[in-house]
Amino acid sequence: MPGVRASYHTLSDGVSVRVAESGSPHATPVLLVHGWGASIYMWRNWFAPLSESGYRVVALDLPGHGLSDKPSDEGRYRLASLTATVRELIATLELRRPHVVAQSMGGTIAVDLAGGGDPEIGRLVLVNPACFGRVHLLPLARRASPKVVEPVLARLVPRWVVDRAHRRVYGDPSLITADDIDQYWAPSQFAGYAPAMRRLVHEFTWTRPPVSAMVQVLRALTPPTSPPLVVLGTRDRLVRDARPYAAALRKAGAPLEIYSSVGGGHAVNEERPREVLALVTAFLARA
């Protein structure tokens, strides 16, 4: 894409991570973190508008995703490990007090990152964060993917499977193009992709904390991180019951701003970039 720079960075554990950037390297950074099974492609419509608004835009393919390495060691896809990856990348790229916009699984990572206090995070935007809802397909996915199936998983990701799965993340699947499906299907054909997705299903922390515990986490965030902005699609078919959970957090005194995208799906940041970008740009400008 014009104006977008791609690079690879090998971290301390030997894993190479793909990064895409736009905007001035001296501008305030905005780090974009995708969810399970996605990649930098999710943010394709965010680079130009954010960089034109004066930000350094940085997106990464998390390990196991996109064109980043797909390590096979046990525990590599736990929450703590993925948070450590993002933390090290922030240091490697010298991102000072970056704003973080994160979707689904990325939202859980972002909350964990911000709660650690190091590095210091700017403003935090969570789009349908997995830690706010119930991933209702998780029990079925775990039963259907014991470790013994790993050797044959690569054969189980034909294009039609990716097509059907991706259409579940939009409130309006008619907005998805054939090129979108190709861009999501292509990385799934690497040998390590399907095993990495299986390991994420089993290793990552998908359960949401009790309201009281999450309230403590959000209260502990130091300015300018708090209060985070939570963007929820009302037609999210994958992470259920996030809106009542967010409302309960607010009622319990959590510092939180909530926006509902009526009719938007799980990947509303990708499905409705103009709507969500306008909201996020205004939110970041208040920092």
Image: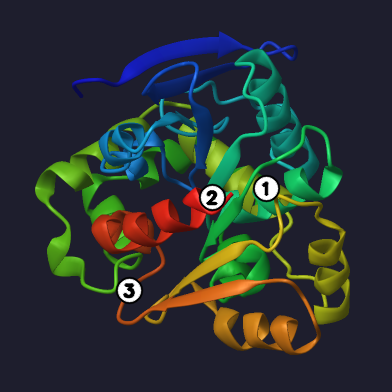
Give the quarter of the image for residue 248: bottom right
User: What is the spatial separation of the Cα atoms under label 1 and label 2, in whole angstroms?
Assistant: 8 Å
The residue that label 3 is drawn on is: 264
Between discs 2 and 3, the one toward the N terminus: 2
Q: Residue at x 81, y 70 (%)?
A: 214
Q: Which residue is mark 1?
A: 109
Label 1 near label 3: C-beta < 8 Å? no
Q: Name the residue that disc number 2 marks.
A: 102
On the rendered structure, is 101 left or right of 263? Answer: right
- Residue 150, placed above or below residue 207: above
Q: Nearer the viewer, residue 207 or 108?
A: 108
Q: Is residue 56 left or right of residue 31?
A: left
Q: Nearer the viewer, residue 6 or 200?
A: 6
Lower position in the chain sequence, tag 3 or tag 1: 1
Q: Secondary structure at mark 3?
A: loop
In the image, residue 97 lies at what x, y percent? 67, 33
Q: Residue 283 bears which disc, if any?
A: none
Neighbours of disc 1 within 10 Å: few (<14), some (14-19), many (20+): many
Q: Label 1's element?
A: helix
